[in-house]
Image (cartoon, coloured by chain):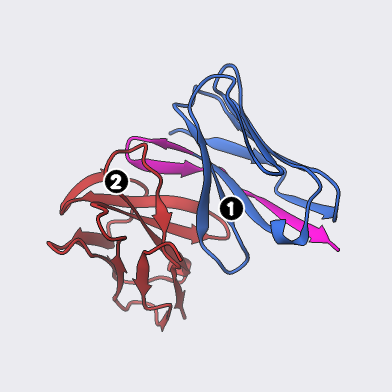
Chain colours: A blue, B red
């Protein structure tokens, strides 16, 4: 079935550094959603991208959907300790979410 | 607080036992989804119900079953439990369409000893 690969698995950054996580699919995605899960918490919806080449921003977070709709990225500028958590991409198709493996972000103060 | 509630928060049981996890969706949401999160398998979709009817099935074992009641709350039943069933089980809800945002509950942590 559909698989969404996400890299890297882990990322340690110094506070203030930038961070990027990438999602890739071998097939065209109908959409891509991004979720954040804080340690000990539950996934929280961040954003959905639908159109080819779409770029959306939320304060220090920039989300991109590739032109071929086979990849997506989440970039955080100047990380803060509050950004700690695992970031998941997911395709929402056919009433189910297919999640990538997640990228766990750790921020050193 | 997403508005989705799940009980219990933690559950410890033995192999071979049966447990029931409960989920109440956000007010007005008709769709309920169940997900399993484990270290080796990540976040996996199990099953979806919409207004009482099963709508989609994912990687759900035959030992697992679910239902959605007329008041829209849902239960996930896990039977003949194995050590490998230890995981976080999340319920999520959405208004209706498949492109809707899904709101996740706090999860039930199941430990099978």
Residue A98 colored in magenta in the image:
yes
B55, above or below B105, in the image: above
Where is residue A99 drawn, in percent x and y? 51, 44
Q: Visible in this render: residue B81?
A: yes
Question: Which residue is farthest top?
Answer: A68
Question: Which residue is farthest left?
Answer: B70
Circle 2: element type = strand
A35, above or below A25, in the image: below
Which residue occupies the foreground of this view, A41 or B28? B28
Which residue occupies the foreground of this view, B111 or B90? B90
**Residue located at (29% from left, 48% from top):** B95
Mark in front: 1 vs 2: 1
Circle 1: element type = strand
Q: Quadrant of residue A12?
A: bottom right
Tags 1 and 2 both on a single chain: no
Q: Visible in this render: residue A22?
A: no
Q: What stretch of residues is rendered in magenta?
A: A91-109
Q: Which residue is mark 2?
A: B57
Query: Whole-Å distance between the Cαs marked 1 and 2?
Result: 24 Å
Numbered badge on residue B42 = none
**Residue located at (76% from left, 61% from top):** A81
Q: Chain of mark 1?
A: A
Q: Chain of mark 2?
A: B
Where is residue B70 drawn, in percent x and y? 12, 61
Asked if disc 1 and disc 2 are in contact, CB closer than 8 Å, the reply is no
Numbered badge on residue A36 = 1
């Amino acid at each position: 079935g559909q698989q969404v690969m996400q890299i890297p698995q882990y990322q340690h950054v110094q506070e203030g550094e930038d961070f990027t996580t990438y999602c890739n699919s071998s097939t065209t995605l109908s959409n891509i959603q991004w979720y954040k899960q804080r340690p000990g918490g539950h996934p929280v919806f961040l954003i959905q991208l639908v159109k080819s080449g779409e770029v959306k921003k939320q304060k220090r977070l920039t989300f991109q959907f590739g032109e071929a709709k086979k990849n997506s990225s989440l970039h955080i500028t100047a990380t803060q300790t509050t950004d700690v958590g695992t970031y998941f991409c997911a395709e929402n198709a056919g009433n189910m979410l297919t999640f990538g493996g997640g990228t766990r972000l750790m921020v050193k103060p | 607080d997403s508005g989705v509630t799940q009980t219990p928060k933690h559950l410890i049981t033995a192999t071979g036992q049966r447990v029931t996890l409960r989920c109440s969706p956000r007010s007005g949401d008709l769709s309920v989804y169940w997900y399993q999160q484990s270290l080796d398998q990540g976040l996996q979709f199990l099953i979806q119900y919409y207004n009482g009817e099963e709508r989609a099935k994912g990687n759900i074992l035959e030992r697992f079953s679910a239902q959605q009641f007329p008041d829209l709350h849902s239960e996930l039943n896990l039977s003949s439990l194995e050590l490998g069933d230890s995981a976080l089980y999340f319920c999520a809800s959405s208004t209706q369409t498949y492109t809707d945002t899904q709101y996740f509950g706090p999860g039930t942590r199941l430990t099978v000893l």
